[in-house]
Image (cartoon, coloured by chain):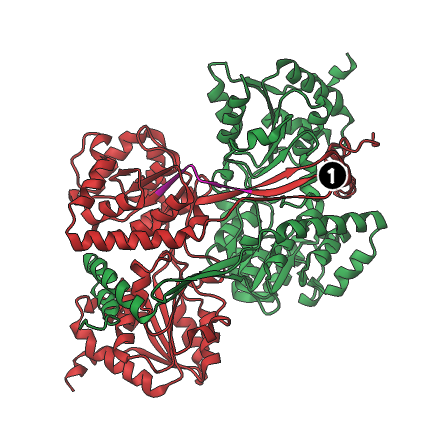
Chain colours: A red, B green
Amino acid sequence: MAERATANFTLSRLDTREADFEARLDALLDWEGVSDAEVQARVASIIQAVRARGDAALVELTARFDRLSVDGMASLTLSAERLAEAYEGLPEAQREALRHAAERVRAYHQHQKPESWQYTEADGTVLGQKITPLDRAGIYVPGGKAAYPSSVLMNAIPAHVAGVNEIIMVVPTPDGVLNELVLAAAHLAGVDRVFTLGGAQAVAALAYGTESVPRVDKIVGPGNIYVATAKRAVFGQVGIDMIAGPSEILVVSDGGTDPDWLAMDLFSQAEHDEDAQAILVSWDDAHLEAVEAAIERLLPTMERDAIIRQSLQARGALIRCRDRDEALALVNRIAPEHLELSVAEPEALLAQVRHAGAIFMGRYTAEALGDYCAGPNHVLPTSGTARFSSPLGVYDFQKRSSLIHCSAEGAATLGRTASVLARGESLTAHARSAENRIPDAD
Amino acid sequence: MAERATANFTLSRLDTREADFEARLDALLDWEGVSDAEVQARVASIIQAVRARGDAALVELTARFDRLSVDGMASLTLSAERLAEAYEGLPEAQREALRHAAERVRAYHQHQKPESWQYTEADGTVLGQKITPLDRAGIYVPGGKAAYPSSVLMNAIPAHVAGVNEIIMVVPTPDGVLNELVLAAAHLAGVDRVFTLGGAQAVAALAYGTESVPRVDKIVGPGNIYVATAKRAVFGQVGIDMIAGPSEILVVSDGGTDPDWLAMDLFSQAEHDEDAQAILVSWDDAHLEAVEAAIERLLPTMERDAIIRQSLQARGALIRCRDRDEALALVNRIAPEHLELSVAEPEALLAQVRHAGAIFMGRYTAEALGDYCAGPNHVLPTSGTARFSSPLGVYDFQKRSSLIHCSAEGAATLGRTASVLARGESLTAHARSAENRIPDAD
């Protein structure tokens, strides 16, 4: 049993028929991201420094945290030309793959563009809704080992499709290391300017503006605990996207998918980091055994096997359920970020799926395809928040304004109703303002 | 000069031609809502009590804060029948006004319903977006003097139109006082159940659930500092709407609207509370004088004159600008919650308005009409957040899931691109998961 070299590793097995199933599932899913008081205090003081001293604080903090010798903001600024150079300098295969991904992500997001609308009532009153893009968006891109060009595409392209006038990207360059793929992705995605800033100081600069960094209207993109804490702190001053928890996948298999494929799909989630969560649900006992064996066999062949092992052991699981309906109930209970319906007829299950960030249908649709280039966004609601939130999209970079244009007749009709209701709420200025527009009133 | 009895009151006059205009405008708009450490600690302990002891904590806290003698949750629960009774018991004029408002709000929000969509690519791959309503929404309604039936309609009807399966309302009843108009509005708006709970304890119950109160997916609705602090604290566990600042209006007048009408429009904003903000902008000097005179003349006739006076004095202003373009620049700079374009041809200005929660067009469209019954929502982004956020709407009670269904051919094409990009990010499990779906690979 050479494969059992990995036997010091135990993957949780749950069964819906067991009495403690609910408790074990709760424990498995439990996750509360918290930033402690010390992190909050450090972030608050960084934000204060940037608000008070602008560029000077940015230069100081960046020199210290990223171990750079910089003398001013000019050395922390990249031009559009530099981004184009990065793109042109890529090896052919990477340039083509990036271009293909960007094109598909753009095409999908074009479908999300809503239209302004209005309608006219019988008395001539016009009601409507006007859609406007944000003036300026800020994209945070992590530096170092978690620098993902795919995230640049996924965060910036929806802003560009939305019609945002200016897209500012910030990316730290610890020890001066620049990721050419990240810059190339920024070029393709329509980023206008890049500042090589990171951490809470980059978030503060985007939220409040400095002499060099323009204030934005919304900040999106992933980051470490300092970035997440800073985003929470500036929420209200600017818009932010969701604060993401660890990435997760729930795979539902009917037993017909190659166990090696499923093992690799679970690995692709688990390799992100130790807190990532990969769960497989099936009503086929033998299939679950086969996937477990595939996991044990393939794990030693993985480059990131230490991370995968830790993630699967701490947060992974194989769940045996009674049938398809029970699997669907689990889906809606868990509300996963990624849902893989690895079954013969995924369409038949779709109507019953109420909560999931992205749904990967059929045996061919590996989550990894969606992570890079299928088209839909890979920034998705985590930790059960798919119950109430959506993938990042064009709608995150636009907002709506209500339109009301009353005709004289409409104002009189509405004024009578408003007057009664306003007086019912003891708001008599409201009532009198409405009554002013009723001809026979006063 | 009998009107000058109000002369101890000064309304700020600003002029864009003055050197200190920007600084004065900044000071006028400055607003930061903060909850101090004591409030945060009290809210945290209330949330903890409700999570730990459920109904028992709710009964205790409600008895204490609302000065009620209650023996269990049954006495804090109102049935759908009780709501219907409240509606039937209203005076005819109020019942009719409420019904008229509800019908119009419902009709407008029907226009906001998006459709799920999907498209099929040449190789058979299907991409799409599925819209699903939230399972359960919680509506917070303040009790006591700020109990507004119109807010019940504005918060609950979009949830109902969205297709939310269950709408739970909470409303405190300090000293046992129930507002029949509020209950009647809940009946009309499609509220399923009401708990007479308030404060941080009501928010905690909705966010985490108790034996009697079901956990919801999103909490919306206005409240005092305890409610706002609790909503911020449970954000992530559930969705929340924006934390609202004081209500505000910006009126742009071309000089052609009756100064008495405009004075009353400003009063209708100012009468909400002392922090409310009412600003008038015009390029017509004589008109600004006339409106100021109207304000002084009409103020003593107002029921809520003390509040109006305080609000106008602290946060109101008349702004003289050079021309229409400068007025529009101010609009976009301020990004007001309510914008009244009290001009001859408001359509001509509309294209240049980028940021506003709701736009009231023409001399007949008093903001009060929109507050009650024009149709659009009166829950709007405040304090400049219209730069990046929208009125409350049907979209707040639905979420999107991405759909990806790759054909075998599509998976092979996408797999090649995903493989290159994943290897560029050193995520080899991603790469191998994608490569598994390429027939000639391995």
User: Badge 1 is on which residue?
Assistant: A410
Report whether A393 appears left or right of B440: right
Provide the residue span drawn in magenta. A130-138
Q: Quadrant of the C terminus of chain A?
A: top right
Q: Give yes or no for residue A214 being in the magenta stretch.
A: no
Q: Where is residue B2 shown, x and y percent of the image?
A: 78, 14
* Relative side of A302 to A317, left or right: left
Q: Chain of mark 1?
A: A
Q: Measuring from the top left, give residue B119's x and y in whole percent.
A: 43, 61
Mark 1 neighbour density, 10 Å: few (under 14) some (14–19) many (20 or more): many
Question: Is residue A160 placed above or below B366 in the rendered structure?
Answer: below
The residue at the point 71 percent across, 28 percent down is B264
Residue B310 picture location, percent across and down: 65, 28
Above/below status of B51 relative to A428: below
Can you see residue A276?
no
Q: Dot 1 lies on which element?
A: helix
At x 40%, y 84%, the residue is A283
Residue A133 located within the stretch drawn in magenta: yes
In the picture provided, is A333 more to the left or to the right than A426? Answer: left
